[in-house]
Image (cartoon, rainbow, N blue to C red):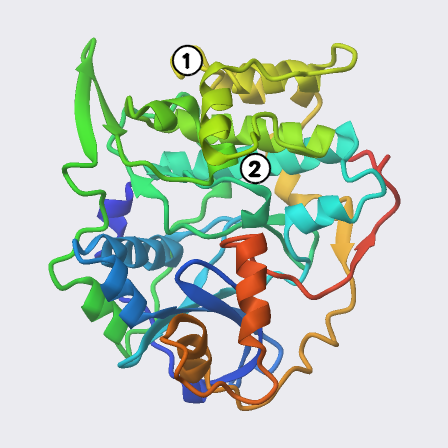
């Protein structure tokens, strides 16, 4: 079922700040702040509350593009039913902010996990586990007609059970395309469940005031080839080290950009660096378009897969069927991957995280970071440090927990 068939099926449950205990700020992005919160009605349920400044949306979104992105993200989150993707737990809106609550991942992200390794890289077996889960998550998104377009280690979170969760969908888009070459096992993709309609969301009404959760007509174009309808987008999106050549060249792109980004991510996990990073943005883009990735070391199935993913021509790039059938995943039982009981790394004790500040004024906090600097920030909140974090790693979720390995980097999962 496509996203456009889903978005009108159910209302989205509303939250109120009075329903939540906001514990601490755990990260920030280009448009908002992520808070760790607890649902007062369920004392044990921890939530990631993504709060976005309305003023910033209006400033950046004079063409209503920012509204579309936020609305699209909260709508698709509401309809995800997959163990490797977040669930929308509720939304809220005030005069100053819009926010939505999702599943909280106590294990931080894949970027920080790699940095914690002795040599800042993973073994082939550990890479196989995370790669397999990423393939399943992207397969599900593509089956819904969603191109993710921002795959990078900072957007791959580690759940409390050690499995991944792909987050941050504000750069994603819906594409009307031919059916993917392989589709998820229906038994692994539950249908959306009805929700309690006692209260309706102010954010839902705000997002349905004539705003479509699609790219604008000027950003996407439909191309017809050999009877197959393929929609390609020309919008320039993504994080520069991970964007595909077709995005850089502006020739239009489709689902294949996600497989390119997967190749960059696997390269980074194997070598501890991305393959095309230059001294500046211009050089990075030049390398993406022209440079062949250096896959040093003996020939292995992993290096072969990376080479096929980093094919410059999207028409020749390996896709879902070839990826799942590749020698690197030869012994993988795909339906069992999300059920593995002992992934390579399990988050440590999160008790310290839940003992954060009390009575955080979320709106004042967000205004203090994204406002004009004249807003008084609550005591104990260091806005300058948040800004430094943003300059270091824009749009990354900042984790504050220690991670515990289940064994070592020779962990074998298959």
Residue annotated with mark 1: 313
**For the point 47% across and 35% down, which residue is it?**
281
Tell whether label 2 touches label 1 (CB within 8 Å): no
Tell me what residue is drawn at x 45 percent, y 41 percent. 150
x, y percent for residue 339: 66, 45
Residue 183 appears left or right of 262: left
Residue lying farthest to the left in this orientation:
210
Between residue 46 and residue 65, name the one nearer to us.
Answer: 65
For the N terminus, the quadrant is: top left
Mark whose residue sits in front, 1 or 2 = 1
Residue 140: name its quadrant. top left
Q: Is residue 304 left or right of residue 198?
A: right
Q: Residues within 10 Å of mark 1 (few under 14, many from 20)?
A: few
Kindly identify which numbered label has been placed on residue 134.
Answer: 2
Secondary structure, mark 1, is loop
Quarter of the rendering containing residue 273: top right
Is residue 26 visible in this depiction of the protein? no
Q: Position of residue 362 (x, y in %)?
A: 45, 81
Relative to 2, does residue 157 appear above or below in the rendering?
below
| SS under mark 2 | helix
Query: Is residue 59 shown above or below 126?
Result: below
How far from the left and from the top, in percent, is residue 12?
31, 67
Where residue 376 is drawn, which disc sits there?
Answer: none
Mark 1 or mark 2: name the one nearer the start of the chain: 2
Q: Is residue 40 above or below residue 84?
A: below
Q: Position of residue 306 (x, y in %)?
A: 61, 20
Q: Residue placed at 39% from the left, 34% from the top?
A: 142
């Amino acid at each position: 079922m496509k996203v456009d068939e889903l978005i009108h099926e159910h209302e989205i449950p509303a939250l109120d700040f009075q329903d939540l205990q906001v514990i601490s700020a755990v990260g920030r992005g280009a448009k908002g702040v992520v808070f760790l919160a607890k649902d007062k009605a369920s004392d044990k349920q921890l939530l990631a509350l993504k709060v976005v400044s309305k003023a910033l949306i209006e400033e950046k979104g004079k063409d209503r593009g920012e509204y579309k992105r936020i609305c699209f993200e909260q709508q698709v989150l509401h309809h995800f039913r997959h163990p490797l993707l977040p669930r929308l737990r509720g939304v809220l809106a005030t005069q100053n902010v819009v926010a939505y609550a999702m599943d909280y991942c106590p294990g931080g992200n894949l970027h920080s996990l790699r940095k914690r390794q002795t040599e800042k890289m993973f073994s082939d077996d550990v890479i196989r586990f995370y790669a397999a889960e990423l393939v399943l998550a992207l397969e599900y998104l593509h089956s819904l007609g969603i191109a993710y377009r921002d795959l990078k280690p900072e957007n791959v979170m580690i759940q409390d059970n050690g499995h991944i969760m792909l987050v941050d969908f504000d750069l994603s888009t819906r594409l009307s395309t031919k059916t993917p070459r392989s589709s998820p096992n229906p038994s692994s993709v539950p249908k959306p469940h009805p929700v309690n309609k006692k209260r309706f969301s102010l954010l839902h009404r705000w997002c349905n005031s004539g705003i479509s959760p699609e790219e604008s007509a000027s950003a996407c174009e439909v191309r017809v080839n050999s009877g197959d309808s393929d929609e390609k987008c020309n919008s320039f999106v993504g994080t520069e080290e991970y964007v595909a050549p077709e995005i850089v060249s502006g020739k239009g792109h489709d689902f294949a950009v996600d497989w390119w980004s997967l190749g960059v991510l696997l390269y980074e996990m194997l070598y501890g660096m991305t393959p095309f990073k230059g001294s500046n943005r211009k050089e990075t883009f030049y390398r993406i378009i022209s440079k062949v990735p250096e896959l040093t070391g003996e020939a292995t199935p992993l290096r072969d897969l990376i080479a096929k993913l980093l094919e410059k021509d999207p028409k020749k790039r390996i896709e879902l069927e070839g990826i799942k059938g590749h020698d690197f995943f030869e012994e993988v039982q795909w339906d069992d991957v999300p059920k593995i009981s002992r992934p390579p790394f399990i988050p440590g004790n999160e008790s310290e995280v839940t003992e954060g500040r009390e009575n955080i004024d979320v709106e004042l906090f967000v205004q203090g970071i994204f406002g004009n600097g004249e807003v008084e920030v609550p005591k104990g909140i260091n806005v300058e440090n948040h800004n430094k974090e943003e300059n270091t790693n824009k749009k990354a979720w900042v984790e504050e927990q220690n991670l515990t390995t289940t064994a070592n980097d020779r962990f074998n999962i298959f």
